[in-house]
Image: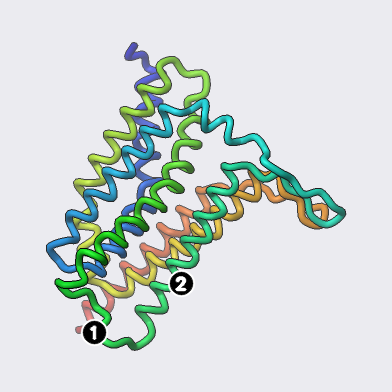
Amino acid sequence: MFTPEIITAFLTLTFLEIILGIDNIIFISILAGRLPEEKRKTLIRTGLFLAMFMRILMLMGISWLVHMEEALFSFDNAFFSSAISIQSLILFAGGLFLIYKSTREIYHKVEPHDNSSEPTSKSAPNSYAKALFQIVLIDIVFSFDSILTAVGMTNGLAYAIPVMIAAVVISIFIMIGFANPVSAFVNKHPSLQILGLSFLLLIGFMLIAEAAHISHTVIGGNPIGKISKGYLYFAIAFSLGVEMLNMKLRKGSD
């Protein structure tokens, strides 16, 4: 069973799941920052465990996911054509939700607001439930995108489902180990929060573009092509590197 091909696929998938899970960590960390200190670690762990269970459930229903590629309805005219499937609807809705949530959070952070709007011990349960609900929604979208990538990579591989499940479980536990320090660091530096929200905004637009691609959308005779995630993660890594240099510069000038 443990052939070089399977071991290579497992290690590659684990690495990819961690990279793709960065979106989850950023989103959960920013939501956790709005809660009282004692609730943050619980929310982060719960959010990541939910992400793991979402991914495993979707892997167990691979045939259902494949069936979701079939078009529900389509548009076809001289300027615009598209074959809308459940997959494209989920990615489109998730992209819109990320754009809305990121824009709202950026506005909340850059505009002056009354401190009375900050969570108190009385409002904490409601805030926690609201944050958890939002995490469940975005976990569905991120899990969906992650599993589609994993399925594409393991197509034709023996024991593909167990390998994908093992990679998901290991990657989530690795992310749980790093999530709290990452969350504390992000919430300690307001500029990183804005940068993280900007990444989520970018990911939202990318999800919409991906939804258009898998629904074979054509606008004005131009098909919507696939955007490589490599461009996105390079932009994130480059921006983060520049921000780290800025933080070091500010610290040195204090």
Residue type beneath disc 1:
Ser
| Residue at numbered disc 1 | 116
| 111 relative to 181 in the view: left or right | right
Classify 10 Å Cα crowding around label 1: few (below 14), some (14-19), many (20 and above).
few
Report whether 180 appears left or right of 91: left
- The residues bearing labels 1 and 2 have C-alpha atoms spaced at a distance of 21 Å
Count of marks placed on residues: 2
Nearer to us: label 1 or label 2: 1
- Of 132 and 250, nearer the camera is 132
**Mark 1 touching mark 2, by CB under 8 A?**
no
Q: Where is residue 206 in the image (x, y as percent from the top left)?
A: 55, 55
Considering depth in this image, is 252 or 1 the residue closer to the camera?
1
Q: Reading the chain from its start, which is encountered first: label 1 or label 2?
A: 2
Q: In this view, does 208 lie above or below 148?
A: below
Identify the mark at residue 23; answer none if there is no mark.
none
The amino acid beneath tag 2 is Thr
Q: On the rendered structure, is 44 left or right of 230?
A: left
Along the line of sight, which residue is nearer the eye, 108 or 123?
A: 123
Q: In this view, does 248 lie above or below 141?
A: below
Is residue 75 placed above or below 114 in the rendered structure? above
Please give the name of the residue rendered at 46% of the width and 72% of the height, measured from the top-left corner.
103
Q: Which element type, helix, strand or loop, lies under badge 1?
A: helix
Q: Nearer the viewer, residue 9 or 23?
A: 23
* Residue denoted by label 2: 103
Circle 2: is it few (<14), some (14-19), or many (20+) Cα within 10 Å?
some
SS category of the residue bearing label 2 = helix
Query: Which quadrant would residue 2 be assigned to in this image?
Result: top left
Quarter containing the N terminus: top left
- Image location (x, y in percent) of residue 233: 45, 53
Give percent across and percent down for residue 8.
38, 24
Q: Name the residue rendered at 65%, 35% in the picture.
A: 70
